[in-house]
Image: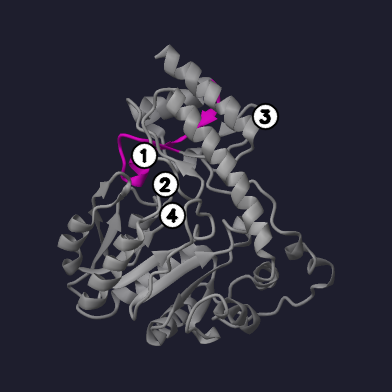
Amino acid sequence: MGKEQLSPALFIGVQGEDIISFGSGQPDLPPPDAVYKILPDYRDFKYGLIQGTSELRQALSRQYPSSTADSFVVTNGASEALDLVLRAIARRGDPQKNKVLIARPYYYSYPHIVRFAGMEPVYTDAIDGRIDFDDFAAKVPDCKAVIINSPSNPTGRVEAIDTLKKIEAITSELGVYVLSDEVYKDLIYVRENYLIAGPHVVTINSFSKTFAMCGFRVGYLWSLDQELVQETIAIKTHTSMNTNILGQEMALAATSVPVSFIEEQLEVWRQRRDLIYQGLLDLGLELWKPEGAFYVMPKVEDPEDFVWDLYERYNTITYLGEWFGAPDRVRLSYALDVDKIEEGLQRIGQYLKSR
């Protein structure tokens, strides 16, 4: 096996005593204690409502403006929410208008999910790791939908509020759908989250990142476009039916966790961010300072060699930026403890000296 075999599948789930993995986007922090407390007495494992339990949707409706429980669909993670919405949107309007605008760098599954829905991904450029709005504005009239992800996986960058407001305005004027991937909305270091709003906006979120519940596979979509919500329910009825009932009950418990839980976790992420950001700068690498989420994306020479050699020679996993639309960079997740981050930085330093 050689570097031509590089793919996310090569690294996902890889474990070992000497492995340092900067690959996984999975929090290593524990979920809140509240989600475990229902387990001893929980006994209901029948089919549930396709749209999601009423109790969970009611709890979610209290977190979003002008919404009711009917505005939500609980899904198998945020990925299913995105898949359902894109398939529903693909069937609407002019069938010849099938482009979806994605900002580079992007979460690596976006182009694939767009294609699975029978649509075509197109890309807008970035300036300093954020959306180039002039380029966005030039391309969006030809699109049926756009995907916005702020804070960003893979960069950790947060879009400027002014840019988000301009995106709101132009997409509303053109009748273009906005799919706002908000899975990192609670993990912002620089300001409060700005929630994109509008008649054609679909907010996508999950319990995976904020509450460290990736394996529970509970996400949701929220939209004031009730017809679109109903179309996603119709698709879900014949694909996956209800989302995991036990997972939904545990997610419901998470909605009542005090904000101090999130604040404490955010402080851990901030300390790790500072450590890895400064460490990579000290190694001479160029990178954007993350403002949210838990990723950094340094620019490196020969990214394929960097990723392959670090893995083969130093048991250290990083991800190719090419998978995220940034071929001159690599992505590192700092979802691992400080000792491992420090050891990983040492290994990267040793590798760079050996080149």
Residue 299 falls in image quadrant: top left
Residue 171 falls in image quadrant: bottom left
How far is disc 4 from disc 2 in space, using C-alphas? 9 Å
How far is disc 2 from disc 3 in space, using C-alphas? 26 Å
Q: Name the amino acid type tagged 3.
A: Glu
Secondary structure beneath dot 2 equals: loop
Left/right placement of residue 292 relative to residue 135 reads: right
Tell me which label, 3 or 1, sits earlier in the chain: 3
Look at mark 4 in the image and give the residue it sits on.
151
Of 237 and 284, nearer the camera is 284
Q: Do the residues labelled 1 and 4 touch (CB within 8 Å)?
A: no
Secondary structure beneath dot 3 equals: loop
For the magenta stretch, what is the residue range?
Answer: 314-331
Secondary structure beneath dot 1 equals: helix
**The label number, if any, that marks residue 321 in the structure image:** 1
Tell me which label, 2 or 3, sits earlier in the chain: 3
| Badge nearest the viewer, 2 or 3 | 2
Q: Are marks 3 and 1 in contact (CB under 8 Å)?
A: no
- Residue 92 position, x and y percent, is 28, 80
Quadrant showing the N terminus: top left
Secondary structure beneath dot 4 equals: loop
Q: Residues within 10 Å of mark 3 (few under 14, many from 20)?
A: few
Look at mark 3 in the image and give the residue it sits on.
17
Tell me which label, 1 or 2, sits earlier in the chain: 2
Q: How crowded is mark 1: few (under 14 residues within 10 Å), some or many (20 or more)?
A: many
How far is disc 3 from disc 1 in space, using C-alphas? 26 Å
- Residue 144 position, x and y percent, is 24, 71
Look at mark 2 in the image and give the residue it sits on.
154
| Badge nearest the viewer, 3 or 4 | 4
